[in-house]
Image (cartoon, grey):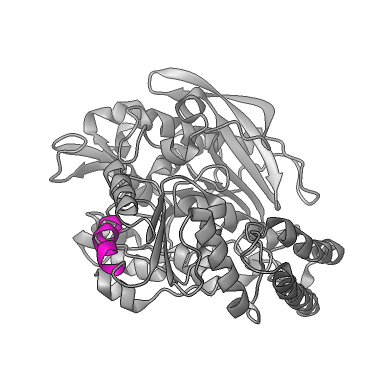
Amino acid sequence: MASLTASHFAPRNSYVSSHGSETTENFGQIGLRSQSMTHSGLRSLNMVDKLQFKTQAFARKSVKKAYATGNDTSGKIVCLQGGMTVVFVATEVAPWSKTGGLGDVLGGLPPAMAARGHRVMTISPRFDQYKDAWDTCVVAQIPVGDRVETVRYFHCYKRGVDRVFVDHPMFLAKVWGKTGSKIYGPAAGEDFQDNQLRFSLFCLAALEAPRVLSLNSSKHFSGPYGEDVVFVANDWHTGLLPCYLKSMYQSRGIYMTAKVAFCIHNIAYQGRFSFSDFPLLNLPDEYKSSFDFMDGYNKPVKGRKINWLKAGILEAHRVLTVSPYYAQELVSGVEKGVELDNYLRTTGITGIVNGMDIQEWNPATDKYLSTKYEITTVLSAKPLLKEELQAEVGLPVDRDIPVIGFIGRLEEQKGSDILAAAIPMLVKNNVQIIVLGTGKKYMEKQIAELEKKYPDKVRGVAKFNVPLAHMIIAGADFMMIPSRFEPCGLIQLHAMRYGTVIPFLVMELLS
């Protein structure tokens, strides 16, 4: 794989853009939006307007300084020609599909790379009728199991990135309007029986896309991406991609310079299936050893299995994960490496800290907040946002009551059971707790029961709600992270960006 050096990135001070007028106009509209969105009776509009004018002035000053120095942190994406050709492949890409951090990374990282001069594409399944993605009229014939399936490609161009969606009934018909909960199975913790066929189809369709799609939305790049590309495959669902690249393409002289970087976002999910299913993958027998896996669990079957994540690790050209510390954990032993630590020690693994999308997560411009703020206005703004959050979820409105927020999947890894057990102890104090997340049904029920038991103290919202997530991050005093382990943790980054504390005292109480 091509090494990443400074020469691959366009220098920031060489950016050419016309952002000035557009950015100033957007900041100028903040005050008008806040008047229509602010809850009547919480605080006078004059107070909100005063905060907004201070934030606008700070934002304009920051933007001018960024242009002068070349260090633009406004989130504006400016694409330059040059660099690498990078294709991200993942089952989630925010805001179109998301169940966790994988979708966030695929939403925010590609635009940041495009801004540095790379040509960037993301490929994900078309789980829904995405209103901004249009049919390219390009089709491909993909061998899946013992049959050939036809896929179509949908496309949109956003923030310098070609967003490509693979259309097939195995994706669209199974989800259809419930993207947040049905990507992998009919319910949390339950898999679709044909997931191997779904994701093998997806991997092959992703390999075809750079060759068959002629995309001309960018003023800097046009035509097919070609074969000199770096694929960034994410998690077990894309574990077949390096195997197919070698066995079906490079064996025929195609994609000879292409490389695969395989990124592990959570090693607990590995794609283990019955070894008797290997013929469904349409791979030569020489790849059996890369998939062969034995463990002591009876799920999904007892005995010998195939392991997609193991194959991705062994067949990729480079293995990555989402933080340096998580990389150390994965090679530290069987428990944290979840039985793949030996293979990771053999291949090596590089940890790169996840970043956040600073265009979406910016309290000075956040479209979901009625009161914008920055470092000089945070202490005045957050009480207003807390009151708005309390009103939004139906809790007593009182800026003096500490509000603790939790955002995440309701499952054991995220410590949702620890949270449910700790809430009765926490509410003995004068606090309010707001939980946002979906997951295992019994955990959703636990939170609902706690809400009934403590109606003035606890609120649980068991649905996918982006605006409310932003309101919680901004309006809460504390964010609670009771996870048993976190590969990186985007919630912590968002909280720090918005001036919301993650208290060690609460973490100690829950541990």
Residue 341 is covered by the magenta coloring? no
Residue 95: where, in percent of width, then height?
Answer: 58, 47
Q: Residue at x 41, y 46 (%)?
A: 462
Residue 258: where, in percent of width, then height?
Answer: 55, 47
Q: Main secondary structure of the magenta part?
A: helix
Residue in the foreground of this view, choosing between 191 and 88: 191
* Left or right: 50, with 484 as reference point: right
Residue in the foreground of this view, choosing between 19 and 441: 441
* Left or right: 375, with 223 as reference point: left
Quarter of the image where one finds residue 308: top left
Q: Residue at x 45, y 27 (%)?
A: 174
Q: Residue furthest top?
A: 147
Q: Residue at x 50, y 61 (%)?
A: 390
Residue 417 is covered by the magenta coloring? yes
Quarter of the image where one finds residue 279: top left
Quarter of the image where one finds residue 135: top right
Residue in the foreground of this view, choosing between 262 and 51: 51
Determine whether 352 is above or below 226 in the image: below
Please count the marks in the image: 0
Residue in the foreground of this view, choosing between 494 and 219: 494
Determine whether 185 is above or below 424 in the image: above
Residue 463: where, in percent of width, then height?
Answer: 45, 45
The magenta region covers: 415-426
Residue 150: where, in percent of width, then height?
Answer: 54, 21
